[in-house]
Image (cartoon, rainbow, N blue to C red):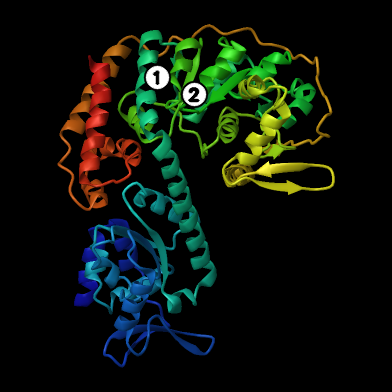
Amino acid sequence: MNEVFAANIAALATRSHSLAAAVQNTPSHPDLAFLTSRSGESVPMIESDGRKVTFHSRYAPIVEAQRRFEQTGPTGFVVFLGLGAGYHINPFLESAEFEAGVIIEYDERVVRALLGAIPLVPILADSRLELLVDPTPDEVNGAVCRAFLPVVTERFSVVPLDGRVRLAREAFARASAAARAAAEAQIADFTVQRRLGLRWTSNSLANIANAVETRAFSAFSDHDRFQSHWRRDSGTRLGRVAIVGAGPTLEDSLAEIGNADTVLSTDTALPTLVAFGLKPDMVVSVDAQIYSYHHLLCSRMTEVPWFLDLAACPSVSRRVDRVFFVGSHPLSRLIAAWFYPMLTLPRPGGNVTQTALSLAYTAGADAVEIYGADFSYPNGKPYARGTYLYRYFESRANRYAPTEGVLLGFSRDADSAYRVADAANSEYRTPSLDAYRIELTEFAATLPIRVTRHKERRPPHSSSRTTARRRIRPPQAPVREPDAGFTELWFAFLERYHTALRSLPHPSAPVSRWFRSLEGDHAAAAATILPPLAAHDTRGVEDVSTAVSWCLDRVERHLR
């Protein structure tokens, strides 16, 4: 083992023992060689299809790397496609704006050859970087989601090492697509955090406090327990599940919905189902705002089980007989880890319909039919009749502005709305609704059960009222879980969380590096301040301190 390789392996081992061991036991790529550039640097090279392909410039690789850095501009998070000799990475490490990154390389033999000839210790040992070798797209996605925090990181970039990428185009293209998709999802989540981050924290604590008082709730740590509980409680499998959204096409599907084995309603659609004589078996709500409570008031459907995101509106959990909590927000994950286990749904998404689909699959559905999930405004109509929002629009109408005009105005004035029309129908769409539709479609394609989304269209003035009714299961008694001592466990959690927040080291710049330096309880508690921090226009050291103080205040309210 030469000195260069030994130093590189030792540096890599500080970041990943398993990867260092794998590379150490791998032979070098037989076709990888090195040449000396005109400026004197060592440049990796592989012969492919009779051509010698160099990873960097054979004239002045450092100058080339600096030029690429200047073209990319100040960037907080970078995905580097290719390790090479590291010349393209070094300028970013020296930049004050750089906060974290991921290096993607394919073929351990290439990595073995590079580490045996090029001194890469500053890159391999840098705590801001993670090296992935032969990653799947899911592994790339996970690495980016873990490391890229839009709350505290300004920009995201992908920097390809062109010569290296040319030798494995498809693999690097998949990695790049996965990285960009992960970054887009993180940025979209950040946008929601800016608007709802404060409520997520307040609601999560309030919902658990409600549960402590009433104990009319259940939580499950794994899918098998959840499925067995459902079968024991209902006496049957879910069978064919109808998921009901609140889009206008719901009105055309009510008779068909009544034939499903199990009806899983979104909170928005609940008043419409009740108005048309249908009683769902379950209701799902993820909205942190008060609207879910309005849907409940319009339906008065308190006896059926409600599945709530832990950050959902606490006014709902106070008034329904039975609640199942699920969660994926940072505080939800902390509560599940430190206090009481909760089911984490696979890919719940940002809308209630996808959460309902994830729930149906987790509960053991044989097949799923989705109704009323239009993800558009057909013929300028945003919601089905009977919903709380439809009633709201009706209340604003008068003889000068009829209901149809108010509905059309809402659809047309939605953020970035655009119109799509054919000979028979027209509809308004928005980028956010398009994103929800695409995300739901992609998620459904990954499930091993049949998922069908129904979207019937009728002329604007057609009527399809139905008197269909379905067998209604008897109401269930409230669940008296968990066991005695629950209150004591809750206050023990609050004390531990409070202690972790109060003992956090004083924030320092750059903030992202401060977050990544934390360990143990400090790291777990610090993750929960990211949503409240997102509400700030700036996210510097003082803003972090303010977010910590705000979280402490919310915890102390429940400790009093």
Does 466 appear above or below 349? above
Pointer 2 residue: 308
Residue 393's spot in the image, x, y percent?
64, 24
Residue type, label 1: Asn
At 53% from the left and 25% from the top, the residue drawn is 285
For mark 1, does the 10 Å Cα neighbourhood hold few (<14), some (14 to 19), or many (20 or more) residues?
Answer: many
Residue 515's spot in the image, x, y percent?
25, 46
Horizontal relation, residue 131 to residue 361: left or right: left
The mark that comes first in sequence, 1 or 2, is 1
Q: Could you say which is closer to the camera, residue 543 or residue 48?
A: 543
The residue positioned farthest toward the bottom in the image shown: 38
Q: In terms of image quadrants, where is residue 488?
A: top left
Does 17 appear above or below 364? below
Asked whether disc 1 touches disc 2, contact meaning CB atoms under 8 Å apart, the reply is: yes
Residue type, label 2: Leu
Helix, strand or loop at mark 1: helix
Pointer 1 residue: 207
Horizontal relation, residue 77 to residue 444: left or right: left
At 68% from the left and 14% from the top, the residue drawn is 274
Can residue 27 be seen here?
no
The residue positioned farthest toward the front in the image shown: 400
Measured in 3D between alpha carbons, the distance from the residue under mark 1 to the one under mark 2, in whole angstroms, is 9 Å
Residue 426's spot in the image, x, y percent?
76, 43
